[in-house]
């Protein structure tokens, strides 16, 4: 738990709060700051994705760090190894706590990301970020995987294959849906981190997600972090939406 947020006075559910990643999917820093104001004092992990990063850039990440938040920079890198290595070096220097890359880029690319992290650490200013591989997006259904993407087998098999690859490359964990967490933890060990989007409190609109679970169900599967965007950001009262989720987790 970060000291600055603790000093602001946290809720009694701070253990869960630190394991909830709020997806700041906004088109400007100003909009994201409005949400931060509403959620003030709740020590969630903040996730910056491509929409906000492409609009507001590294300075918004630095702003979040100054405010005492942990930051997951979700840029889902997927490119040739040398390019990903450079990207990972830059993100490490920026000081994010976690970033992700697509497992589909292959082992050499995943290893190159870790080399980039090592290079970024030589400046001596940054701490080692967690590097997490994206497996099958939570918007992917079984039918899409087989009929559109053309892969055979089940979504779970595809996720496990990617997770094994990520572990073989020495990454810290994976992004997957909560439906695959039990098998990932069984096969790869409980310390292999799972970050799970596709979270929908009971009654929330599913939207473009496909493999979803409620926050309680996801944590009961043993996941380390849950990612929640629209059920909080699109709520009429985002703070109440987050507090209700936290209360139901006690
Ligand atoms: O890497 C991610 O964070 C991610 C991976 C994935 O498979 N599915 C997924 O939804 N995400 C992200 O998690 C967030 C989910 O947002 P909501 O669907 O609004 O809760 C979005 O910012 C997505 O970009």
Image (cartoon, helix red, strand yellow):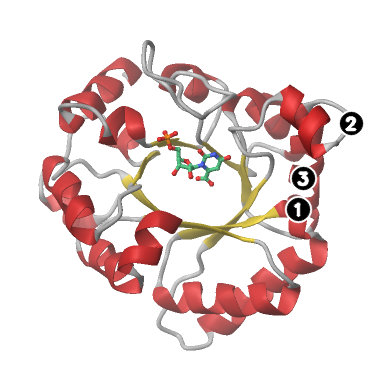
Q: Disc 1 designates what residue? A: 104
Give the Cα distance between marks 3 and 1: 7 Å
Q: How many marks?
A: 3
Q: Nearer the viewer, mark 3 or mark 2?
A: 2
Q: Disc 2 designates what residue? A: 152
Contact between marks 3 and 1 (CB within 8 A): the answer is yes
Q: Is residue 72 visible?
A: no
Who comes first in sequence, dot 3 or dot 2? 2
Which residue is found at the position 25% from the left and 58% from the top?
Answer: 28
**Helix, strand or loop status at disc 1:** helix
Contact between marks 1 and 2 (CB within 8 A): the answer is no
Locate the C terminus by quadrant. top left
Residue extending furthest right?
A: 152
Question: Where is residue 159 drawn, in percent x and y?
Answer: 74, 36
Q: Disc 3 designates what residue? A: 162
Who comes first in sequence, dot 3 or dot 1? 1
**Helix, strand or loop status at disc 3:** helix
Which residue is found at the position 12% from the left and 47% from the top?
Answer: 37
Question: Where is residue 190 drawn, in percent x and y?
Answer: 64, 36
Q: Is residue 212 left or right of residue 149?
A: left
Who comes first in sequence, dot 1 or dot 2? 1
Q: Nearer the viewer, mark 3 or mark 1?
A: 1
Give the Cα distance between marks 1 and 2: 15 Å
Question: On the image, which quarter does residue 10 sit in?
Answer: top left
Q: Is residue 176 above or below residue 172?
A: above
Question: Where is residue 201 drawn, in percent x and y?
Answer: 38, 18
């Amino acid at each position: 738990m970060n000291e600055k947020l603790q000093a602001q006075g946290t809720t009694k559910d701070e253990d869960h709060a630190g394991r909830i990643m709020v997806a700041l999917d906004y088109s400007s820093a100003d909009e994201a700051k409005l949400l931060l104001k509403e959620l003030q004092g709740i020590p969630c992990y903040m996730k910056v994705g491509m929409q906000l990063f492409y609009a507001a850039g590294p300075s918004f990440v630095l702003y979040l760090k100054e405010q005492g938040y942990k930051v997951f920079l979700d840029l889902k890198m997927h490119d040739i190894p040398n390019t990903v290595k450079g990207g990972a070096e830059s993100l490490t220097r920026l000081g994010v706590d976690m970033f992700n890359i697509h497992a589909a880029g292959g082992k050499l690319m995943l290893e190159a990301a870790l080399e980039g992290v090592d290079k970024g650490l030589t400046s001596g200013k940054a701490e080692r970020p967690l590097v997490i591989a994206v497996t099958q997006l939570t918007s992917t259904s079984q039918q899409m995987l087989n009929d559109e993407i053309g892969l055979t087998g089940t979504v779970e098999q595809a996720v496990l294959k990617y997770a094994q690859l990520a572990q073989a490359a020495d990454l810290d964990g994976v992004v997957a849906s909560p439906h695959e967490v039990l098998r990932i933890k069984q096969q790869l060990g409980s310390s292999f981190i799972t970050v799970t989007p596709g979270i929908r409190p009971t009654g929330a609109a599913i939207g473009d997600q496909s493999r979803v679970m409620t926050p309680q169900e996801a944590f009961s599967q043993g996941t380390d972090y849950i990612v929640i965007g629209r059920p909080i950001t699109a709520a009429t009262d985002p703070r109440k939406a987050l507090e209700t989720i936290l209360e139901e987790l006690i």
